[in-house]
């Protein structure tokens, strides 16, 4: 009996992974992203509040500070996983789940996630959705986020 339960649990885990990985089920974009009155977008799936517009291009050192300075202490650079959560493998130029986010440039965006030995930082190109790592002195666009 325990053997059958173990196999059933394993099959269920595989089904869940396939559904998530291949986007077999996803809530509608209209329900997932909600435009708020303060020029922000609420992502109901991740419980993150995104600034609707990027705030320009700058190096990573400045980018890391600008979110708090411009919007308040709870705002920050998103992690690479948070940036990946708003991209879509089925879309290009921009590779975004919604057109409600970022009404200006669609290029490389900084994350807060270090790459390897902390000399480089992960970023994501929102034209094609590809993650890259780059030197902290390079200029990339900045999108701020906070937990909701």
Image (cartoon, grey):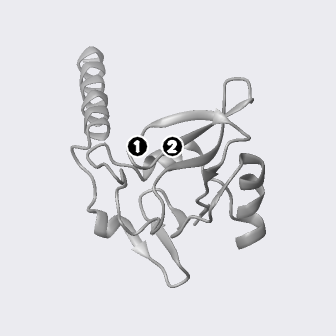
Q: Tell me the quarter of the image containing the C terminus.
A: bottom right
Question: How far separated are the C-alphas under marks 2 and 1?
Answer: 6 Å
* Residue 60 horizontal/vertical position (percent): 71, 47
User: Residue at left 28%, top 27%?
Assistant: 14
> Quick check: 101 above or below 58?
below
The one nearer the camera, 7 or 44, is: 44
* Residue under label 2: 124
Residue at mark 1: 129
User: Picture quarter containing residue 44?
Assistant: bottom left
Q: Position of residue 45 (x, y in %)?
A: 41, 58
Circle 1 SS class: loop
- Near mark 1 (Cα within 10 A), the count class, few <14, some 14-19 or many ≥20, is many
Q: Give the residue at x 24% y 25%.
A: 11
Q: Residue at x 56, y 82 (%)?
A: 38
Residue 126 lies left or right of residue 6; in this view the side is: right
Whether label 2 touches label 1, CB < 8 Å: yes
Residue that sits furthest to the top in the current view:
3
Quadrant (top left, top right, bottom left, bottom right) of the N terminus: top left
Which residue is located at x 70 percent, y 72 percent? 71
Give the image location of residue 72, x and y in percent. 74, 71
Q: Quadrant of residue 16?
A: top left
Q: Is residue 121 above or below residue 147?
A: above
Q: Nearer the viewer, residue 77 or 42?
A: 77
């Amino acid at each position: 009996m325990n053997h059958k339960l173990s196999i059933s649990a394993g099959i269920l885990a595989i089904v869940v992974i396939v559904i998530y990985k291949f986007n077999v089920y996803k809530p509608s974009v209209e329900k997932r992203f909600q435009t708020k009155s303060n020029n922000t977008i609420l992502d109901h799936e991740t419980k993150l509040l995104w600034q609707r517009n990027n705030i320009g291009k700058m190096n990573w050192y400045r980018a890391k500070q600008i979110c708090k300075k411009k919007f308040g202490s709870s705002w920050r650079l998103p992690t690479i996983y948070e940036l990946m959560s708003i991209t879509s493998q089925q879309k290009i130029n921009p590779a975004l789940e919604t057109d409600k986010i970022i009404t200006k440039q669609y290029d490389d965006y900084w994350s807060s996630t270090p790459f390897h030995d902390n000399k480089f930082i992960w970023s994501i190109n929102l034209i094609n959705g590809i993650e890259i790592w780059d030197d902290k002195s390079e200029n990339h666009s900045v999108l701020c986020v906070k937990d909701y």
